[in-house]
Image (cartoon, rainbow, N blue to C red):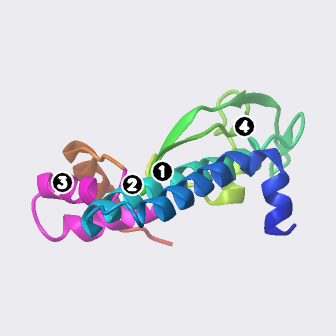
Amino acid sequence: MGALAMIEDEKWTESYKTYQKIFEKFVSESNSGKKLHDVETELFDDIMELGKQMLQEHLDAHGNGDVGAAIVREDGKILNHKREGSNQLATQFGKVNVNPQGYGQRSENRIFPLKEELSLPERSFSYPLQKKVCFEAIKGPYSRVTETLDGYTKAHVSKQQIEHMACYLRKPTYG
């Protein structure tokens, strides 16, 4: 499906409208006499909001991962208790909503086809955001990590969350 056909699809119209508004604002402000740093700051904020909106629409376009009445695991176990989850995923652009359909059975772990399809993280932080947290966490105090992330992403990650994430990501994994 080409980009123009996708824009005509209702799932993408809001982000396209936002893109048009940003572009029109940028072009009209080019003659407004604003200082470059003001234009850059506004443009960054607008583009981050557009990125968040596009990520949300990308998730929405995939639906909730419902694959029918039940899932049959490799071991033959039928998982037919369905329940849609409701999660927020913190990304570099801000928080987006993910509502994956889960399949389970009493005393069995749930399977979420959408999480597998999109390789969603187990934790409520996107992989690129986790990478930034780790990169910043090795540089110094966790309180500074929060300040730094607040400065160049739209994801607020608390000091406690950074500490927990840094410990979790440091644990060795054995194959």
- Kindly report the distance in space between the C-alpha atoms of the residues bearing marks 3 and 4: 35 Å
**Foreground mark, 3 or 4?**
3
Residue underneath mark 4: 101
- Kindly report the distance in space between the C-alpha atoms of the residues bearing marks 3 and 1: 19 Å
Task: Determine which quarter of the picture holds residue 152.
Answer: bottom left
- Kindly report the distance in space between the C-alpha atoms of the residues bearing marks 4 and 2: 32 Å
- Kindly report the distance in space between the C-alpha atoms of the residues bearing marks 2 and 1: 6 Å
**Foreground mark, 4 or 2?**
2
Residue underneath mark 1: 49
Residue 60 drawn at (x, y percent): 70, 44
Sequence-first disc among 3 and 1: 1
Secondary structure type for disc 1: helix
Label ID, residue 5: none
Residue 143 drawn at (x, y percent): 13, 51
Q: Pointer 3: residues within 10 angstroms few (<14), some, or many (20+)?
A: some
Secondary structure type for disc 2: helix
Sequence-first disc among 4 and 2: 2
Residue at 60%, 57% in the rendered image: 19
